[in-house]
Amino acid sequence: MDQFSNHPLYRKHTIDSVMSTLWEFYKKNFLVLFLSSFVVCLCVQFISAKINFGEITSYTDPMQLLEKYKSMMVPFLEVAAISLVFNVILQYYVMYNPLEEHPNIFAAAYKSLKYLPAYIVILVLFTFMAAAALIVGLILFIVGMFFALFWLAMVFMFILPILMAEGNNIGHTISRTFSLSHRGFWSNMGWVAILILIIMVVSFVVSGLIMIPFSGSFFKIISHPEEAASAMNFMTNPLFVALSAILSALITPVMPIFSAILYFNGRSRETELATPVPNNEPDRVRVEDLYAKPYSDDHPDNPENKHTES
């Protein structure tokens, strides 16, 4: 029996059930998901505060700008590494937390690390594929670029659930990612697009509200880019860092839960197709059944019995 068959996210979904199931799972595990995400997001925000984005706008010399970016490489890599590892931990927790008798985020952190090397290799390969897809999207202009972005996001969301549920094998994970993500292609694309747009709108609005006490207006930075350097000094303010971490912590668990929903939806549909449908139709009357038989079925001289014995 499939070990995930009792998982609360394992079912064949519609757009309504996707949102309702995501919300129910998020609400049930909110405390662990939020607190762990908040700690990690707070670390990321403090590291990001070291990067003076406003100072970048004051450089006009390309060489000076390049040197500035080089000096930012270490905090960028720190943020990327923390985000990568935590994404693996959070995905493992979403996949296995409902199946364990005594779930623990720290145990999930330890157990999930065995998937990290394979995940990094797949991400490197995925980066090359993403670059090629975006180039094709740019060639096809705006519509193609957005299609390529949503397609990449859809494929990407299947990687970790497959890696964790079906074995730590790079080749199998890559092939299964493409086959399962393209099963129900348009529904998967639609759900991913809707969720990404919702997150983008919510993040934009809430970020704007958070910035009001510090900059006066979020649109001030956009409408007066020449004042961006001075206007963005508030990003090092501890209160702004904490508020940004809270916002990020609220949003961060959504994607791992949604990834699991996409995967389990694909698996349940796949299982449904593989299960043979029982034939409930009554036995049909054959033409020969309309005529009297010269011998009964158990008669020793019945030629059909002799043919069967031979």
Image (cartoon, rainbow, N blue to C red):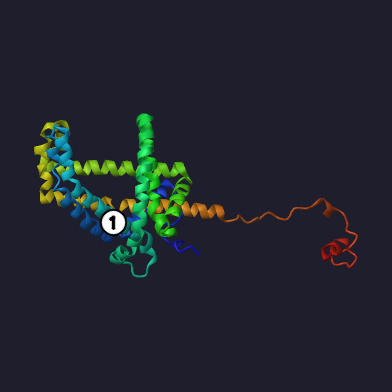
Query: Camera-side residue: 3 or 21?
Result: 3
Q: Residue at x 30, y 65 (%)?
A: 110
Furthest-front residue in this view: 63
In the displayed structure, 189 sits above or below 162; it is above
Q: Quadrant of the C terminus?
A: bottom right
Instruction: Using the rendered view, name the quadrant where residue 53 is placed.
Output: top left
Q: Which residue is mark 1?
A: 85
Query: Camera-side residue: 204 or 125?
Result: 125
Q: Amino acid at mark 1?
A: Val
Q: Residue at x 43, y 60 (%)?
A: 167
Query: Camera-side residue: 290 or 155?
Result: 155
The location of residue 17, given as percent across then percent down, is 41, 50
The location of residue 281, given as percent across then percent down, is 68, 54
The location of residue 76, given as percent across then percent down, is 21, 48
Q: Residue at x 28, y 58 (%)?
A: 33
Q: Dot 1: what SS?
A: helix
Q: Is residue 89 left or right of residue 181?
A: left
In the displayed structure, 56 sits above or below 283; it is above
